[in-house]
């Protein structure tokens, strides 16, 4: 009997995201900004509940999202 290794769908999603993230054509964040939408991201050295919100006009805020989903602006960057 030959056993096949079955990939978890989540593994495929993470592999696809890693490939997309490392692609030289990855400009999804810029596309979102160009369309007038803010983007959210975190730096590696930031706590897990803190993010940066960047607006299309270049304004940036340090934000925290509480357990209820309420966004608190900690400071403007």
Image (spheres, helix red, strand yellow):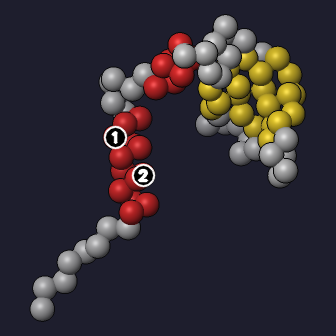
In the rendered image, which residue does mark 1 sit on? 19
Q: Is residue 17 left or right of residue 51?
A: left
Asked whether the residues under the numbered discs 1 and 2 touch, taking CB atoms below 8 Å apart as contact, a structural biologist would say no
Q: In this view, does 9 lie above or below 66?
A: below
Rendering coords of residue 40 (x, y %): 65, 30
Q: Which of 59 and 69 is in front in this view?
A: 69
Location of the C terminus by quadrant is top right
Rendering coords of residue 33 (x, y %): 57, 17
- In terms of image quadrants, where is residue 74? top right
What residue is shown at x 50% (from left), y 18% (from top)? 30
How many numbered callouts?
2
Rendering coords of residue 23 (x, y %): 33, 30
Single out the residue that lies furthest toward the left: 1
* Dot label at residue 14: 2
Q: Is residue 5 left or right of residue 12?
A: left
- Assess disc 1: are there few (<14), some (14-19) or many (≥20) residues with their C-alpha within 10 Å of its C-alpha: few
Single out the residue that lies furthest toward the front: 35
């Amino acid at each position: 009997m030959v056993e096949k290794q079955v990939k978890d769908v989540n593994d495929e999603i993470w592999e696809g995201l890693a490939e997309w993230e490392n692609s030289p054509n990855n400009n999804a964040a810029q596309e979102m900004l160009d369309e007038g939408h803010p983007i959210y991201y975190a730096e590696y050295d930031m706590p897990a509940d803190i993010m940066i919100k960047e607006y299309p006009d270049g304004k940036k805020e340090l934000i925290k999202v509480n357990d209820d989903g309420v966004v608190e602006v900690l400071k403007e960057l």
